Amino acid sequence: MGKIIGRYVLREVLSAWLLMMAVLLIILTAYEVGAVLERAAASQFPQGVILRLIYLGLLQYVSLVAPMALLLGIIWAFGRLYHDSEMAAALACGVRPMTLYRPVIGLGLVVAAGLAAVTLVLAPEATHQALTLRDQAIRAGQFAPLEPGQFRAFGGGSAVVYAQRVEPDGTLGNVFIERTHGPVVEVALATRARHTVSPDGNMQTIELYDGERFEGVPGSARFRIMRFAEHTVPIPMPPANEVVTDLDAAPSSALLASADPRSQAKLQWRIALPLMCLVFAIVALPLARLNPRQGRYARVWLALVVYVVYLNLLTAAEQWVGRGTLPVYVGLWWVHLAVIGLAVALLRGPAMAQRMRYRLVRA
């Protein structure tokens, strides 16, 4: 009987976790698509890299989504079991609480093992590929030829160029250029122009012929207007990160070999997320306990509060270790111990309080 009930509880929790994962990933996919399309439009990304950037971004989000989905899935599943009196019936039939909790902890171990592979191996590699691919896409978009009748951003968005027509020899006709220098906006109009790139690829130049230039601060009445026969507009290229130095993209083996507190903090952060799954598998059990008259979703808000506080404490601890405020050996481990202590108090607290009241009554 115990095995049947254990499989039933595992099926309920697993289906709830998968449902939460799907919902959260759909929400994050919508956000990631919007962010990637915005960057692609500003930097003229080639179309072939957009889907890959979206996939790499989602792979980085899995490490944050999985623990939250596990916590909400357990709360959701056990909330239904308590609300429908299935837990009360099982306990009344002599089923031990550990029989109900064992499959949940086993699922937490499996999720933690899979998440460890993601945070320690897959996510850093995905971050490295995303940063490299983004730099390559920016430079490829900047070097692509101008298309007639389309606005084009250059220099990381510092300049916008429009040409009404493009001749076969590359000459631009009826050109519009807008550049910003702090609060000052410069607009140039020319009948002809030529677009060239320096040999090292770090500077682009647009030579304007027979036009006017307007310069001033928007909203003020003072503008400077000049006519020119020839005007050169230099546009520096944004720096390329050919060697990715972001700690999020560094391999876990490199972080382990480094004595830098920031590297050690980042490594402990990658380990902390799988450990969060194990802690949630323990914490969610007492959090999901409902009184007979409570609704099945009564503890969802409490689960969200626990997740937010837990994640913020981990983030703060990572910053403290990276700055040297906390020793590396203390690191992020104290956060897990504090949350586990809270779970033990929630599990053992009611029984201890009941025994204490019994002793007081006898005394």
Image (spheres, rainbow, N blue to C red):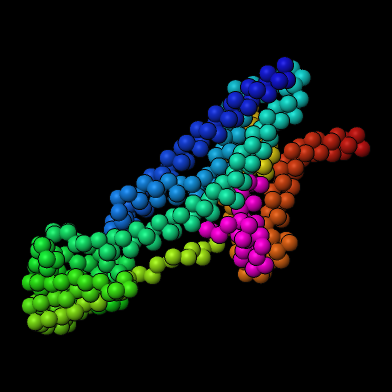
Figure check: 296 above or below 262: above
Question: Is 33 displayed left or right of 87 in the figure?
Answer: left
Figure check: 78 above or below 255: above
Residue found 55% across the figure and 34% down from its top: 17
Residue found 49% across the figure and 51% down from its top: 126
Residue 309 in sight in this render: no
Quadrant of the drawing holding the C terminus:
top right
Residue found 77% across the figure and 19% down from its top: 94
Start-end of magenta stretch: 248-276
Position of residue 314 measured from the top left corner of the image (x, y, whole percent): 62, 56
* Of 264 and 232, the residue lying toward us: 232
* Of 196 and 263, the residue lying toward us: 196
Q: Does the magenta run of residues contain 266?
A: yes
Position of residue 263 measured from the top left corner of the image (x, y, whole percent): 62, 63
Q: How many numbered marks are there?
A: 0
Q: Does the magenta run of residues contain 280?
A: no
Question: Is 12 displayed left or right of 210 in the figure?
Answer: right
